[in-house]
Image (cartoon, grey):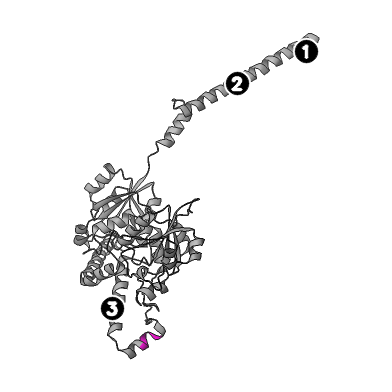
Amino acid sequence: MGGGGGGDAVADKQAAAKWVATWMVGGVIIGVSLMGLYSGQNLWPFNVLWSRRRNKKPIRVYMDGCFDMMHYGHCNALRQARALGDQLIVGVVSDAEIIANKGPPVTPLHERLIMVNAVKWVDQVIPEAPYAITEEFMKKLFDEYNIDYIIHGDDPCVLPDGTDAYAHAKKAGRYKQIKRTEGVSSTDIVGRMLLCVRERTITESHNHSSLQRQFSNGRGQKFEDGGVTASGTRVSHFLPTSRRIVQFSNGRSPGPGARIVYIDGAFDLFHAGHVEILRLARECGDFLLVGIHTDHTVSETRGLHRPIMHLHERSLSVLACRYVDEVIIGAPWEVSKDMITTFNISLVVHGTTAENNDFQKEQSNPYAVPISMGIFKILESPLDITTTTIIRRIVSNHEAYQKRHEKKGESEKRYYESKTHVTGD
């Protein structure tokens, strides 16, 4: 029995030694494998998994449009399109193609390119894209631009002959659809501008007693159809939500010691002139804070029938700009010492092209405080474009734009008639 006990002890020792050796060898293998992973050696399975992750092809999606009088609805469409892939490539339709299919654009191609390039969800822009996705252009998108999917909203895009502009993409199985942003369209904005100009003309032609009846206590006429607000601005059907604002926000804060630049304004009918001055302002520091004036402030300083777009609409357009880090929705007219301290503002800037020149006044200058502190700077505006510029374009060509919208309506009517004929509904 004693000899048997000794044999068991030897066997136990041998088993223990074997167990330790097995784990040591296993540890060495794992260690070598990990070293191979970091040293770039071709060791399976770590390098295989790492290689697959590293070489994953980004999903590239394409969306096109005229982007005329670009507004927050366009920006929201681009945001949704970008969410369907890793990279968003945007085609901007040429002036000639817009004229042939819809009528004259309000903003020329070079301004529309500035606007689209400035949208923070856009990775690449293709200028002078065709209005319709032809088989030839679709092949170019797939082969040269490595596009995986073509995106469009759920509203019909109809050619003059009544056919679907995205028929080829749908047939190829490479088409995806997003939801259209309700409450705004270029047609609606044109209508707002023409209405405001018309009512202003009527107002100015009335005698004093008529003016008193229409604008008691300095407030604008209220129309029974709900077309115009008390400030004279046409009512928008857009209903702002905190979720939409969050979707457009960057969600970032200035870092320690960041140079915060502040610029304010109405930013009504957000246009290429706004984009370019924001770009220059952003280059002046590390973080760009944009103050957007209230509807009441804009009406008081720009005229009874301004703004065309209300505060939250204007805020979303500014938030979508890649040069903007944060906005103050409803910023005060005057830049105070308390405001400068609260937001840790290092520099206040203003462009040379503006609707008014209040920044040059000696009395009641809204920038008196930053001027006295030596932190105010005037930037040379790259483009001589204002909101009034856009309105004048519309007014001077309103007959052509009216025909354009009638033409669009006729095309859509033919499209729906063809769909009814096919489905038998």
Query: Is the residue marked by circle 2 packed among few (<14), some (14-19), or many (20+) residues within 10 Å?
Result: few
Task: Determine the CA span between mark 2 and mark 3.
Answer: 88 Å
Work out whether residue 86 or residue 394 is closer to the camera in this orientation and state it: 394
Point out the frontmost of discs 1 and 2.
2
- The location of residue 224, given as percent across then percent down, is 38, 82
Point out the frontmost of discs 2 and 3.
3
- The tag on residue 43 is none
In the image as oriented, which residue stretches furthest toward the top?
A: 3
191 to 205, vertically: above or below: above
Is residue 214 magenta-colored?
yes
Q: Secondary structure at mark 3?
A: helix
- The location of residue 196, given as percent across then percent down, is 31, 76
> Residue 239, can we see it?
no
- The tag on residue 5 is 1
At label 3, the amino acid type is: Arg
> Residue 231, can we see it?
yes
First in sequence: mark 1 or mark 2?
A: 1
Name the residue at 54% across, 25% down.
Answer: 31
Task: Determine the CA span between mark 1 and mark 2.
Answer: 29 Å
Query: Is the residue marked by circle 3 packed among few (<14), some (14-19), or many (20+) residues within 10 Å?
Result: few
Quarter of the image with the N terminus is top right
Where residue 284 sits, quadrant-wise, is bottom left
Q: Is residue 228 left or right of residue 407?
A: right
Q: Secondary structure at mark 1?
A: helix
Q: Which residues are magenta?
A: 212-216
| Dominant secondary structure of the residues highlighted in magenta in the image | helix
First in sequence: mark 2 or mark 3?
A: 2
- The location of residue 392, given as percent across then percent down, is 25, 70
> Label 2: which residue?
24
Work out whether residue 1 or residue 102 is closer to the camera in this orientation and state it: 102
> Label 3: which residue?
198
Q: Is residue 243 left or right of residue 81?
A: right
